[in-house]
Image (spheres, rainbow, N blue to C red):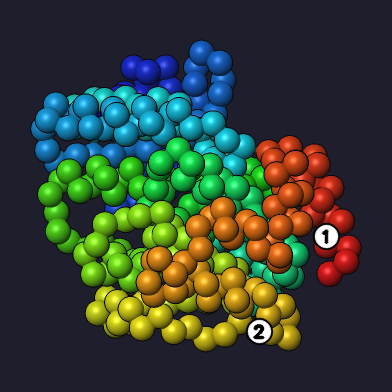
């Protein structure tokens, strides 16, 4: 059965394919009952679905309970044949990776970076407060929405990786540029692994370059476990921004700050306060970014 027929059974019409990934395809759909636009991840599984259906349902149930203006809302999970289809909120303005690419090679002003990064921190802080680890934080998974694209939504949790792990594959898929050193050593994910990934994200926002890069996976792991990165441009950014990156990219997880500790840093606190008050409010956030850009 093709995807259109599978989704039709759940009153969803496929409008277009928006992505093809390692674990399945992503579609923009319309709910025929209420005309709501939704993103549907269609993940094909190569194991007997009934053996893992409860694990998948439990994971999606947890994600569906999340309610925060900076976190993508999960709507439902559908099962058909050997497919799992996850329906979630549609972010209308792309993602942070695309946003940075459009601005490259010009460096983003510090205040603009903080405006977006602080919204990310608020979302991750909420996720961690619910005892959830994201597991796949990267620029492509930081979504932007609203008519002006100024509202940040954290999406694409590591559920795809969880599902893939049920396939019992040991193959490393893709190049894990945001992978923390402890994960390279085979240790489990923890909240500090998310903090490492956010350090990589902040570095990328400041430089348009990956914090760690190499031509081979072995070379990348070596670069990550060495923990050394080129400094950001201190003629453009305050020293406190470099200190922030350095603290988040500490080799030892215990040396990295928690998200709560990060939000209390002097360089972040004013913007944290502002985006917290305006969280999810498209109009207020748009006014705020316009004000910031006037003084850069």
Along the line of sight, the residue nearer the viewer: 35 or 243: 243
Residues packed near mark 2 inside 10 Å, few (<14), some (14 to 19) or many (20 plus): some
Identify which residue, 170 or 65, lies in the foreground: 65
Q: Residues within 10 Å of mark 1 (few under 14, many from 20)?
A: some
Task: Tell me which label, 1 or 2, sits earlier in the chain.
Answer: 2
Identify the residue shown where x is 63% and y is 43%. 145
Residue 78 shown left or right of residue 277 in the figure: left
Residue 186 lies, in percent from the top left, at 21, 64
- Would you say 171 lies left or right of 278 here? left
Disc 1, SS: helix
Vertical order, 135 against 213 (above or below): above
Residue 109 location, quadrant: bottom right
x and y percentages locating residue 250 in the rendered image = 44, 74
Image quarter hosting the N terminus = top left
Name the disc covering residue 292, or none. Answer: 1
Does residue 21 lie above or below 256 as drawn? above
Residue 106 placed where, x, y %?
A: 69, 76
Which residue is depicted at the point 41% across and 54% down? Answer: 191
Q: Decide which of 272, 279 is in the foreground and name it.
A: 272
Residue 77 in the image: x percent, y percent? 35, 27
- On residue 137, the disc is none
**Residue 229 visible to the viewer:** yes
Q: Which residue is mark 2?
A: 233
Question: What is the secondary structure assignment of the residue under circle 2?
Answer: loop
Whole-angstrom CA distance, mark 1 to mark 2, is 20 Å
**Would you say residue 3 is visible in this rendering?**
no
Instruction: Name the residue at 39% across, 60% down.
Output: 193
Q: Is residue 83 left or right of residue 242?
A: left
């Amino acid at each position: 059965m093709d995807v259109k027929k599978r989704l039709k059974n759940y009153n969803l019409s496929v409008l277009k394919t928006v992505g093809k990934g390692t674990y399945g395809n992503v579609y923009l759909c319309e709910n025929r009952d209420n005309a709501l636009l939704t993103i549907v991840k269609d993940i094909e599984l190569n194991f007997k679905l009934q053996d893992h259906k409860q694990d998948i349902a439990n994971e999606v149930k947890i994600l569906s309970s999340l309610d925060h203006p900076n976190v993508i809302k999960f709507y439902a999970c559908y099962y058909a044949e050997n497919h799992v289809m996850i329906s979630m909120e549609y972010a209308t303005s792309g993602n942070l990776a695309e946003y940075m690419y459009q601005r490259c090679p010009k460096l983003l002003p510090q205040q603009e970076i903080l405006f977006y990064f602080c919204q990310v921190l608020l979302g991750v802080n909420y996720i961690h407060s619910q005892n959830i680890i994201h597991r796949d934080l990267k620029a492509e998974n930081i979504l932007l929405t609203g008519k002006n694209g100024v509202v940040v939504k954290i999406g694409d949790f590591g559920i795809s990786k969880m599902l893939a792990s049920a396939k019992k594959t040991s193959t490393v898929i893709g190049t894990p540029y945001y992978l923390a050193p402890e994960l390279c050593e085979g240790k489990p994910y923890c909240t500090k692994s998310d903090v490492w990934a956010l350090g990589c994200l902040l570095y990328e926002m400041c430089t348009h370059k990956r914090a760690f890069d190499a031509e081979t996976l072995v070379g990348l792991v070596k670069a990550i476990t060495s923990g050394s990165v080129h400094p950001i441009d201190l003629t453009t950014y305050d020293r406190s921004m470099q200190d922030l990156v350095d603290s988040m990219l500490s080799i030892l997880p215990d040396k990295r700050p928690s998200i709560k500790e990060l939000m209390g840093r002097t360089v972040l606190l004013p913007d944290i306060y502002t985006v917290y008050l305006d969280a999810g409010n498209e109009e207020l956030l748009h006014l705020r970014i316009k004000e910031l850009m006037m003084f850069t």
